[in-house]
Image (tube, rainbow, N blue to C red):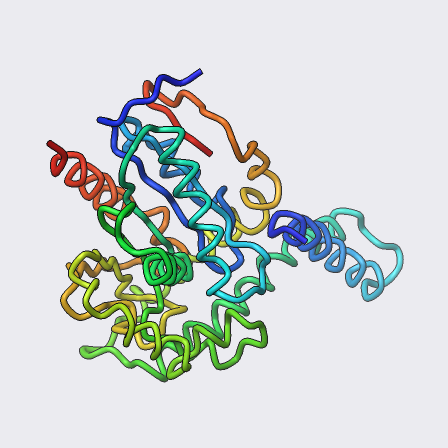
Amino acid sequence: MTIAALQRLWSIGVPLAGALLAWGWLPEPIDPWLVASAAALAPVVVVSVLLAIEFTVAAAADPRSPRTSPLRVTRVFLRELSVSLRVFLWRQPWRSGFPSRCWHAIRGGRRFC
Amino acid sequence: MLARDPRRPAVLLIAGFMCNRAVWKPLLDSGLLARFNVATVNLEPIFGDIDTYAEVVHRAVDRLCAAAGAERVLLVGHSMGGLAARVYLRQNGDARVARVVTLASPHHGTVLGLLGHSRNARQMARGSRFVARLADDDRARWPRFTNVAARDDNMVIPRSNSMLQGAKQIELDGVGHLALIEDRRAWQIVAEEAQAVADQKP
């Protein structure tokens, strides 16, 4: 299985799981907007939890001196979260399909991909 | 059809663990590498042995050199891609590689690798036999490397493990492991290294 195929499954599966959980847990009558919100939030929650584990391990195993300010950690965390969501949910699963042998003109230059 | 141009520096971008060529899209779209011949390569199978990725890199280097008419390439590896570049050099020698830039590569392993179950994750674990053996084998090549590290790396732990002794070392502030690949300062370093390779040519 390719990285793109695996991440296609993930980019569909996680929002779907979020929607199903909301569908199962919310009291009747179910508001479709809440289900849609759960689907949209599910990847954000999953990636945030994984990143939180990484940042916690990093802080514990390799403490900085002087200690990094909470504001700065938050800024780095949010930037990493934003890039991770774009890379793993959109770019890699859905935008990596360019052929393995081609030349593309890009702004005057060329890309061999 | 592209006219082969040996004067145009050739750059091979190697994606890391769980990443594919699309991760380089912002860099490619930035236009900073527009003057160079740039190829990208995925390291697959996803959970394979890093030693086997050297063959993937080898094929990509050959293909790029043939298509671009270049004699040597600049290898740029993000995360595990940097280790794959080192294994490639160990197996194939330096003949086709002018220089190597690694972005947040766990050269001396990472604590998080201890939590992984796949073959390549275990190889990237801190203190693994793989990283120790690789260091023993290629220490003499380290001055040909440029290591770009993220000061706030959330994957390479401890962060100093992304540096090789004797290599050109650059630490960037306020950026995490994956975000480094979208950092304009890192792009600038890659472009400058590619230009330096071009300037080396007669």
Q: Is residue B29 above or below residue B180?
A: above
Residue at the spot 41% in from the left edge and 69% down from the top edge: B155
- Horizontal side of residue B19 vs B79, given as left or right: right
Image quarter in which the N terminus of chain B is found: top left
Left or right relative to A57: residue A68: left
| Position of residue A43 measured from the top left corner of the image (x, y, whole percent) | 62, 57
Which residue shows up at 26% across the image and 65% down it? Answer: B151
Tell which residue pokes out farthest to the right in this image. A28
Residue B109 drawn above or below residue B43: below
Q: Quadrant of the C terminus of chain B?
A: top left
Inspect this view and state whether residue B24 appears.
yes
Q: Is residue A38 left or right of residue B70?
A: right
What residue is rendered at 44% in x and 57% in y? B54
User: Where is residue B21 shown, x and y percent of the image?
Assistant: 48, 43
Q: Front-most of B47 and B33?
A: B47
Q: Image check: B92 left or right of A90?
A: left
Q: Residue at x 71, y 52 (%)?
A: A9
Kindly tell me whether residue A76 is visible in this rendering: no
What is the total number of numbered labels drawn onto the structure image? Answer: 0
Determine which quarter of the picture holds residue A73: bottom left
The picture places residue B98, in percent across and down from the top left corner, at 22, 46
Q: Nearer the viewer, residue B192 or A62?
A: B192
Up the image or down, B45 lies above or below B115; here it is above
Q: Position of residue B10 (x, y in %)?
A: 30, 35
Above or below, B136 relative to B43? below
